[in-house]
Image (spheres, grey):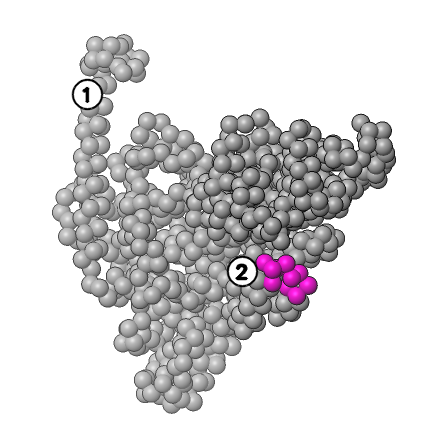
Amino acid sequence: MVGRNDPCPCGSGKKYKKCCMPAEQVVSLAGARYERAFITLLSDLAAYCEGLPDEESEEAAAIFYGLSADGQPADEEEEAHYHFLDWLAFSHQTGDDGELILDRFARERTDPMELELLEAWRHTRPGIYRMEGAEGRHVHFRDCLTGQAYQVSMNGKPKVGNVLMGRLLPVGEGWRPSYELQELNNFPMAELTPVLEAELARMRLAYPEAGWDQLFAHRWPLVRDLVAIISTAVHHQSQIRQPALGPAQSLGRTSPPPEAPAAWGDVARLVVEHMKAEGLPFFERQSALRLWFDAADALKPKVTRPEAWAAGVLYTWHHWVAGDDMTQSDAATDLGVSATTAGQKARAIVDALGLVEDDDRYADPLDPLNRMNLCMSYLTAGTVQTLSDPILTAALEEPDTVAAAEKLNVEAQKLMNRQQWAAARSKLNRALDECPVFVPARNNLALSYYMENNYAAAVKAAEPVLDTHPEYVFTLGLLAEAHFRLGQERKAAERLTRAMGIYRRWLADETPEFLAERQSDRQRLWAALAALEWDRELWELARQEDLSSLDPQGWMWAAAAADRVGERAVAKEWLARAREAWPQVQPFEALLGAIRKMEEGLIPAFRLDFDTTLESLQPGSAHLSALARAVAISMIWGPDARVAEGFAEGLALYGDPWVVELGRAVLAGRGPSERVKMAALTALRELGAVKRGQKVEMLVNGVMRSVTVK
């Protein structure tokens, strides 16, 4: 900090107090006054908006929030309310001439500094910015579309690189956020930019001179919808398509050109008067005026009776643009002309402009239904490429088929829980016949094949999912396991690497609620990591996750990974968590589940708590032989005394030769790794099933070889 008596930093040679300090104090004082005016104005403007008539504020809310009940916010959070408040105060056009709420508020202010700020704020618009850095209380933003840089004073620091949405207001020599900025973590701006460019092109059909300022100023609720669509599409592995634009371009006129006949203006006046009487808002009246002046420019009509053309304009606008049920008779009666006359004028307008339904030149882009249809068109244009949206599209077009497919899928899942795989597949194939895009049924079909060790069929069933959903974690994990069982280790690694990348992105970017909805993705990913023995990756994921919802199987996978990377204390803790969760599962069901996992090679390295399981079974139980099979699973842990003892105990106590057969199956199987095979071989030797020096058949690197027992 420069002292009063220090040399002035400007280099004049004078003391700071005799040179630049007085001027900087003046600037500082002016800045404080601007700051005070800024805070006062935002507070008073918010109060002014809260005091608007209910009818006016509800109409604005219906536009901003879209298809919410009674026009109320779909999200009642305070942050969402502030986004609405900003748009209502600074952008929403009202009254007969499209006046801003800000203009009405300004007429009640008298302070010169406040009026200066309000005049500057009239020319602002919301925008999309990227956070580039910070310096003290100042942060550096850059407009993502125009590249303009801003130095912004604000409380809090957004994450560098993040995208922010909202309005920046000029205050003195700098900028301040309006009521609230929305921060988007790791938002894919590269995906949004072409969509916004398409919307700007669409806006130019109505307003040829429009630029980014006009798009954001007048269509901000639509921009927010598109941001939400991009977020949804990226997180659900969708591809955004560009819907086609309309057939032509409007002249963008809402008033007659200077050389136009006076009668053209008379037609416009009649149209506006009747639309006002209908209670239609300002922007819809502007749409009808553009329709009329485009038609007049094309037809060059000699208007002898303005009422006839006004009736034609009203019918055309209601029928072709708004999609209303107004008849030619309705339009004609209101203006005192015949229905035939109104129909003739309307046909002339339609033919001259080449009108199509919901024409981009005249349809209201902020109408909630239009916005929904437009957003859907980005997701459904061309070949449908989304995870959930094809189902949504089918639900909109053929709701009965989706409902039937969903019912069949639920029935199939119940059969799968009872291991009735063939019956389940029958239901799933019927579901896909009903709705081929019903992805849950296709994934379950692949899983049913996998659970019966038909890995080739599982791959064939699952791969079509990736044609339309290339980053579906569940499918990628399932395919990784199936490729691994088929000895296709390179393909398995590729699938698993992609699944890991997506899931890590979710962990970094998404909320706990988002992750909670994707438990099946995590389960399948962890199963694949365990099958391929990617212990380091599984350990790292487990450290990042909220493990409160893990089932016993998940805890044991996590414990195994921790043990293998040398984290013995953590492994012990996580095994204890598995024991806590285990009693919640029927012992026999748990044992059979563990055996199935072993047969699938899904358990890489963990010690089952056999004591707990044994205590849960009564001596003489018909299911005690299952315990011997569970003991066989312990061979995966490694060739140590505990393995040999457990393996031998299972065979000796229950005399189940299946234990030996299981060991031999592991040696010949494609799934178990070489380390697992050596553990099985050691256990078999300790049991006396094989002897030192004996040759046994073992699959190594996809080739069956004779291996000498050591």
Between 298 and 113, the one nearer to me in the picture: 113
Residue in view at x 36 percent, y 74 percent: 264
Between 520 and 3, the one nearer to me in the picture: 520
From the image, tell me which residue sits under label 2: 389
Left or right for 413, reference 670: left
Corner quadrant of residue 330: bottom left
As for residue 401 lying within the magenta part, the answer is no
Q: Amino acid at mark 1?
A: Pro
Q: Which residues are magenta?
A: 415-424
How many other residues sit within 10 Å of disc 1, few (<14), some (14-19) or many (≥20)?
few
Between 649 and 105, the one nearer to me in the picture: 649
Q: Secondary structure at mark 2?
A: helix
Q: Amino acid at mark 2?
A: Asp
Picture coordinates of residue 285 (x, y %)? 34, 69
Count of residue discs: 2
Residue in view at x 25 percent, y 36 percent: 172
User: Quick one: label 2 or label 1, which is nearer the N terminus?
Assistant: 1
Task: Kindly tell me whether residue 463 is visible in this rendering.
Answer: no
3D distance between C-alphas at marks 2 and 1: 63 Å
Figure quadrant of the C terminus = top right
Left or right for 111, reference 270: left
Corner quadrant of residue 335: bottom left
Left or right for 164, reference 626: left
Tag of residue 306: none
Task: Kindly tell me whether residue 51 is visible in this rendering.
Answer: yes
Residue in view at x 60 percent, y 60 percent: 418
Picture coordinates of residue 563 (x, y %)? 58, 30
Residue in view at x 54 percent, y 58 percent: 388
From the image, tell me which residue sits under label 1: 22
As for residue 417 lying within the magenta part, the answer is yes
